[in-house]
Image (cartoon, helix red, strand yellow):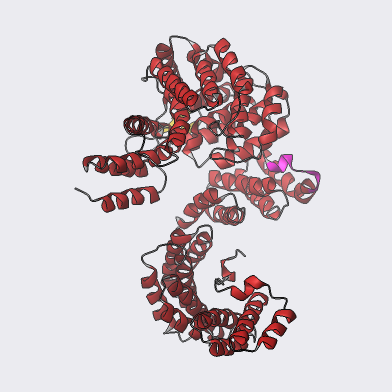
Amino acid sequence: MMSEQQLREAFAAAQAMPDGPAQHTALDGAIRAADAAGEAKLAFEFRHESIEKFVFGGDDRRAFLAFSLSLAAYDRDPEIGGPGTEHLILWQFKWIVNALPEFPDVPLDRTYAVLEDMRARYLRGGHSLHAVHQARWQIALHVGDLDEAAAAYHDMITAKQDSLANCSVCVPSAQAWYLLTLNRPEDAIAVAAPFADSWCRTQPERIRTNLMLAHLYTGDLRKAAELHRAAYRAMRTERLHFSALGTHLTFLGRSGNALRGLELLERHLPWLDGTTSPHDVLVFTAPAVLVLNRLAEAGHADTAVQGRPGPDGRRPATTVAALRAELTALVEQLAARFDARNGTTNQSELARQRMTAPQLADSVPLSVLDTAGRRTRQRIAGVQEQIAAHTVAGDAAAAALARLDAALLLRDHSDTETRYGAAEEAALALERVGLAAPLLRARELLWQLYRSGGQHRDQAMVVLDLLLAEPSLTASRRGQLLDESARLFWGDDRAERSVLAADQHGMAGDRLAELRSLSDAVSSARHAVWAPAEQVLARADAIAAAPPADADPALWDTACGRLNLIAAWWYDSEDRDDEALARAELAEQCRDGVLRGGAAAFTGWRLLGRDRPAEAEQHARRGLDGADEDDTRRLHAVLAVSLRAQGDEAGADALVKAHDLQAWELDDDGYDYDDSEDEDD
């Protein structure tokens, strides 16, 4: 039987795992262990905290069970949770009631019962029914009751949006989808466009996807293409967006881009077998059939494509025609199951429409090279001519290399869409023709763009995994990439990546780079509870004590000084004051004036805290030689406080006045070490 501490540790370890099936299994295991130990309150807490992981990780069935048991436990004992428990349960109702209709084996009566329970609880709590009405019209739309959907939609848009309503981006996103089903794309744009750049857990990808379709329907093809590129870039690495990818297949199938649709289909076809929601499978697969229909109509029925993975994980070769037949049968089977459960023919009719939707444009240009502004076209006009000429000549390899030239020309373009789009297109084209070395260069470019983009860490990490899997990459370059990736993280995640980088530098025989990476790890460790920190510090100290014969003395001295200052801060965070002070004093012996200044500021404040102002003054005066602007202020503050503590009020006042020191600076023992190497180049 596990103790409470062991149970909490097991649950924390599960929470720390990457999102996905393995994490869900671990969370479920921790919950079951709490049940087995008779820890009802702990089991409730674990379930309560796991539901969001299950929902957004695509494991709705686990979410259903966890929510049902949590709700029953709460009804038995309303004190089982904390102060915000009721509000969170009412919020989770929305996730559950929206997901239940997506499983044809869940009776519709069960969904309506949960919806009614949700409504009753919202009313008892004095909450708006905004979210209840939204769930009503979405269920009505699913079964094809357009009158009920219209009534519920009206009730929603006229209800007050309180703290339990869906977020200010998701509501207009859902409204846009509803209006599109009624063939009102202009109204959909009016509702959703103001929120196209707003953020939440699933946004703005979803709202941009809906706007993409609306602009296609209104004939604004350029805008539709821009929205496709921007939304798909964010969606393509997250299974959470699997159903919305079907909308992108619809766009590609109806905009004259069936070949691009086939690329998307081949990339995401393996996700079919890892998706628990039958409805998500249906709304992805029906538009996939549309793309395959377009290809067959254009004479590509015998084109070879990758099929669905077999039991061994391998993807057998098949053809457009064969894959179309397989997916059509799957669509018809799933739609029939939903209709049998719902007592309507709505899902079969929707599926038929999605598989046979008419084309709306002969060819919507998707390349940023075709849709870029005038100045950009002038910069790459020659390269575009080369791409066109090579394409006409059937030389796909040369065309792909020309796309890489364009991407390199546009890497500093002011428009992020142009920068990313050009690099992505080059990498895709080079991957398709199998040019390994240029593809590596394109991925390096993508890595640099994504990691400097702020909002693209997930995409950056996908590219990083591809780069690290490249056999030709040297250990030194692997270390550099891992160092760069560490800067995208914080705390223990960052520290662990820095250690991996150090390992690679060690394999390459670069002791200076290894020392720097280990120092980075210790620096990150003081912002987190990271068990290996002291062991890593000892490894760094051992390297620092044995410089290689060919080491540059100045660079090595700076690296050792930086390590000592970082160690001082780490010991300080562990309340090991004597060791912290000793390491800071070692850092003051460094030749680098900036490091000496930072170390002297650290030492000065610590000595003042020990009531040793004369020594603090000495350290501060020595540290001024070479200190940067920030540390110069801190050192003058140390001097002012030191002089006042020694009775020299006039000297202290003169320093305060000369340097315009503020009152808070004279009580600032919380100075933190600003490691300039943490900044991206």
Q: In the figure, is residue 513 to the left or right of 15? A: right
Q: Could you say where residue 588 lies in the image, as x and y percent from the top left? A: 54, 85
Whether residue 372 appears in magenta in the rendering, the answer is yes
User: Relative to residue 671, is residue 141 depicted above or below?
Assistant: above
User: Relative to residue 233, is residue 412 depicted above or below?
Assistant: below
Seen at 43% across and 78% down, the residue is 577
- Report the span colored magenta: 368-375
User: Relative to residue 188, is residue 201 depicted above or below?
Assistant: below
Seen at 53% across and 57% down, the residue is 488
Q: Main secondary structure of the magenta part?
A: helix
State the residue in front, 637 or 319. Answer: 637
Q: Could you say where residue 334 lies in the image, as x and y percent from the top left? A: 42, 19
Which image quarter is the C terminus in? Answer: bottom right
Picture quadrant where residue 149 is located? top right
Q: Is residue 472 visible?
A: no
Residue most toward the left? 1
State the residue in front, 320 or 410. Answer: 410
State the residue in front, 36 or 433. Answer: 36
Q: Is residue 619 visible?
A: yes
